[in-house]
Amino acid sequence: MLAALPPEEWQRWEPRLEAVDMPLGTVLYEPGITLSHVYFPTTAIVSLLYVMENGASAEIAVVGREGVVGISIFMGGGSTPSRAVVQSAGEGYRISANFIKDEFARTPVLHLLLRYTQALITQMAQMAVCNRHHSLDQQLCRWLLLSLDRLQGHELVMTQELIANMLGVRREGVTEAALKLQSAGTIRYARGRITVLDRQALEARTCECYAVVKKEYDRLLPAVTAA
């Protein structure tokens, strides 16, 4: 997202950007809280969770280097009913919410953020459909692929308990699904590390939801080659 900014915009943004560490499990915002900053993950992945009244939660979207955490700032809402939690440790940048609001009012270049918002809403909607209509095996494959698209390499540091929380299912179900993938030679899981051995096989086992989400991101957002 930051790499896609025109040079003149980047020159104005760069002094305002603050580099931040994003450790695993860090909560960037809670439901209903007015956001003070917008976050741009670079090597981290952030999970957006919908939290139920009884405390149960389920993942509704993931955000990595392609996006931004805190879309309610430039959409005008100021707060959101979701929680943002770092699901894969790394680094990123943050910038003042007030600066973002001023910039969005001043220049149309930030309509890029609106296109990202459309892509993010597509992801949220598709994940809701997926969780309702597709098997846990397919959901796990979709989750792994979306996470891989936001990381460099083929390895994720992730416990089965955390995956179960993200998908809103029992840990035993994730264990069974992961063992099926491992038995098929698609992944290797050991000591909280998941290594994808055969991405094509993973794509063949997932449902249509992954392709729908990826196509919309590719359509709406500019392709950026990492430096």
Image (spheres, helix red, strand yellow):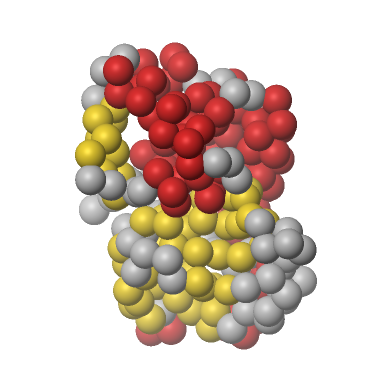
Up-down: is 182 above or below 36?
above
Query: Is residue 49 among what the camera can see?
Result: yes
Q: Quadrant of residue 76?
A: bottom right
Which residue corresponds to the image point at 66% horizontal and 34% vertical from the top-left? 131
Which residue corresponds to the image point at 53% horizontal and 50% vertical from the top-left? 165
Given residues 31 and 113, the one toward you in this image is 31
| Residue 154 in the figure: left or right of residue 147 | left
Q: Pinpoint residue 88: horizontal percent, then vertical percent.
A: 37, 56
The number of callouts visible is 0
Q: Quadrant of residue 175?
A: top left
Up-down: is 42 above or below 154?
below
Query: Is residue 222 among what the camera can see?
Result: no
Given residues 89 and 7, the one toward you in this image is 89
Up-down: is 44 above or below 172?
below
Q: Pinpoint residue 72: horizontal percent, then vertical percent.
A: 69, 68
Residue with the most extreme front position: 172
| Residue 85 in the figure: left or right of residue 51 | left
Which residue corresponds to the image point at 76% horizontal and 71% vertical from the top-left? 77
Q: Pinpoint residue 120: horizontal percent, then vertical percent.
A: 62, 48
Q: Pinpoint residue 93: horizontal percent, then vertical percent.
A: 39, 72
